[in-house]
Amino acid sequence: MFNIRVYGILINEANQVLVSDEFIRGAYITKFPGGGLESGEGTRDCLAREFREEMNLNVRVGDHIYTTDFYQPSAFNPAHQIISIYYYAHPLEPITAPLRSAPFDFDENQLAVYRSSGETETFRFVDWDLFSEESVTLPIDKIVAKLLKER
């Protein structure tokens, strides 16, 4: 079974990279914003939808960056193979979602979401000079972080 994920790399005017800090299934994960492709949905439409759902932000999906080219089992279901697709994302409006300065700095509303669903997330920017493979948790994200830094 394949699990197709679509992620956006948003770099702001201050040369900072947007990341999502999530608490999901008992694990703290820092990743790029995005999520799962739904049936009947194109990858670019998926990414635009994910930004609207997660950040209430309309984006223009830009150039393709990377698609997984190796076998990666899902951390949550080893019977599933993860295929991740990455694009640049360009905001079409100011970001109004709460942004944090520290990892996993969940506010009371986000903690309430966690208490009801067992998952929550928040967003922050990482300065380009501090951004690296170590800034993200997931194996495929680490490859993309390295590719970004090499460009």
Image (cartoon, grey):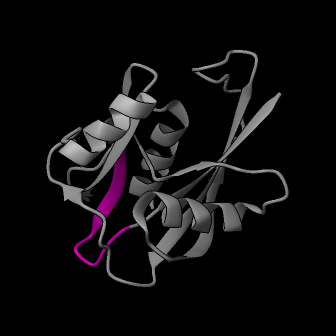
Please tell me which residue lies in front, 70 or 96.
Answer: 96
Judge whether residue 22 is colored magenta.
no
Q: Is residue 23 visible?
A: no
Task: Pinpoint residue 63: horizontal percent, then vertical percent.
Answer: 61, 72
Q: Residue at x 67, y 60 (%)?
A: 46
Task: Pinpoint residue 121: horizontal percent, then vertical percent.
Answer: 36, 43
Please tell me which residue lies in front, 62 or 4.
Answer: 4
The image shows a total of numbered marks equal to: 0
**Figure quadrant of residue 105:** top left
**Figure quadrant of residue 5:** top right
Judge whether residue 15 is colored magenta.
yes
Q: Is residue 93 visible?
A: yes
Please tell me which residue lies in front, 85 or 99.
Answer: 99
Task: Pinpoint residue 80: horizontal percent, then vertical percent.
Answer: 74, 24
Above or below, 2 against 76 in this view is: below
Q: Which residues are magenta?
A: 11-21
Q: Residue at x 60, y 64 (%)?
A: 49
Which residue is at the far left? 101
Q: Is residue 88 left or right of residue 55?
A: right
Above or below, 63 against 122 in this view is: below
